[in-house]
Amino acid sequence: MMHTLTLKNLPVTTILGAYPEERDTPREIRLTLHLTGDFSQPAASDNLDDALDYHALYLRIGELLRTTKPRLIEHAAKLIADLCLTLPDVVSATVILEKPDVPVKTAAAVFQFTLSK
């Protein structure tokens, strides 16, 4: 049985961008994750030890992006999806990244990437 856990609008501060002015100052991006897997055990047990620790995942994603400083939003999304698929019960990850204030005034870039085992 497959279920989906969605983590929506997670703020992550990191360097993300290809232009020189984007490489100097960390900025806040927004992340939404749709993680698909068999989450029937925590649903039945109501035990945190059986559940996906999404706070720990959030911290790992932040560290990943801060250390890799990706240039492209597409690459950042793939890095995050790869990380999510290392979790034991996750079989598919959809990553939606929103990068506000791209070089086009008041615009945002939004990229969606899905990866499965």
Image (cartoon, rainbow, N blue to C red):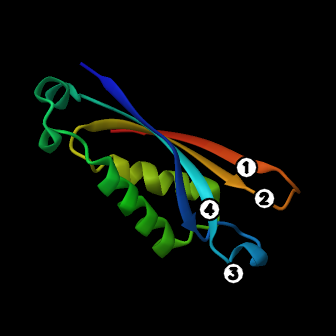
Q: Position of residue 80 (x, y in %)?
A: 45, 53
Amino acid type at image mark 2: Val
Q: Residues within 10 Å of mark 2 (few under 14, many from 20)?
A: some
Disc 1 is placed on an element classified as strand
Q: Position of residue 1 (x, y in %)?
A: 23, 18
Disc 3 is placed on an element classified as loop
**Residue shown at the point (49%, 72%) measured from the top left:** 66
First in sequence: mark 3 or mark 1? 3
First in sequence: mark 3 or mark 2? 3
Disc 2 is placed on an element classified as loop
Amino acid type at image mark 1: Ala
Q: Give residue 102's mark.
A: 2
Amino acid type at image mark 4: Glu
**From mark 4 to mark 2, how far is it between C-alphas?**
12 Å
**From mark 1 to mark 4, how far is it between C-alphas?**
13 Å
In contact (CB < 8 Å): disc 1 and disc 2: yes
Left or right: 45, with 14 as reference point = left
Report the number of discs: 4
Residues 78 and 40: in front is 40
Amino acid type at image mark 3: Asp
Left or right: 54, with 62 as reference point = left
The residue singled out by tag 3 in the image is: 24
Q: Give residue 26's mark.
A: none
Disc 4 is placed on an element classified as strand
The residue singled out by tag 1 in the image is: 109
Residue 58, located in which quarter of the rendered image? bottom left
